[in-house]
Amino acid sequence: PVSSNEVSSYEGHVRVRPVTEGDGGTFVEWYSHWKGNDESAAEFCHGIYAGLLGQLKKTLEH
């Protein structure tokens, strides 16, 4: 896990937009930035983002 001592000034953004070409669908963009001491914060956050985006996909497919 990443502690507050390792990450500061976290800011995240999520955009969800309809795809207007082809068979439709949804485009999701998630990006963030922060100040951190090492790469472990990026690795930690990547796992969280991948899991949450996967769950969002499942929810939107139903």
Image: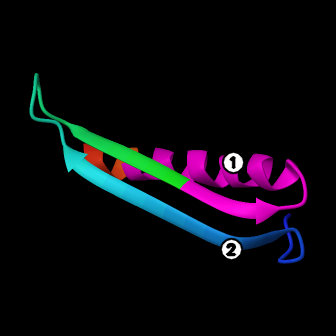
Q: Where residue 8 sits in the image (x, y, percent)? A: 76, 73
| Residue plotted at (69% across, 63% down) | 34
- Examine the rendered structure and indicate whether residue 8 appears above or below residue 1: below
Mainly helix, strand or loop, the magenta region? helix
- Looking at the rendered structure, the number of numbered marks drawn on it comes to 2
* Quadrant of the frame with the N terminus: bottom right
Instruction: Report the amino acid beneath label 1.
Output: Gly
Give the residues drawn in magenta, as a range: 32-56
Q: Which numbered disc covers residue 47?
A: 1
Q: Position of residue 14 (x, y in %)?
A: 41, 58
Q: Report the residue marked by disc 2.
A: 9
Residue at the top extreme of this rendering = 22
Vertical order, 59 against 8 (above or below): above
Residue 7 in the image, given as x and y percentages of width and height: 80, 69
Look at the numbered disc 2 and give the secondary structure of its residue.
strand
Image vertical order of residue 59 relative to residue 19, above or below = below
Look at 68% across and 74% down and name the residue there. 9
- Label 2 vs 1, first from the N-terminus: 2
On whether residue 20 falls in the magenta region, the answer is no
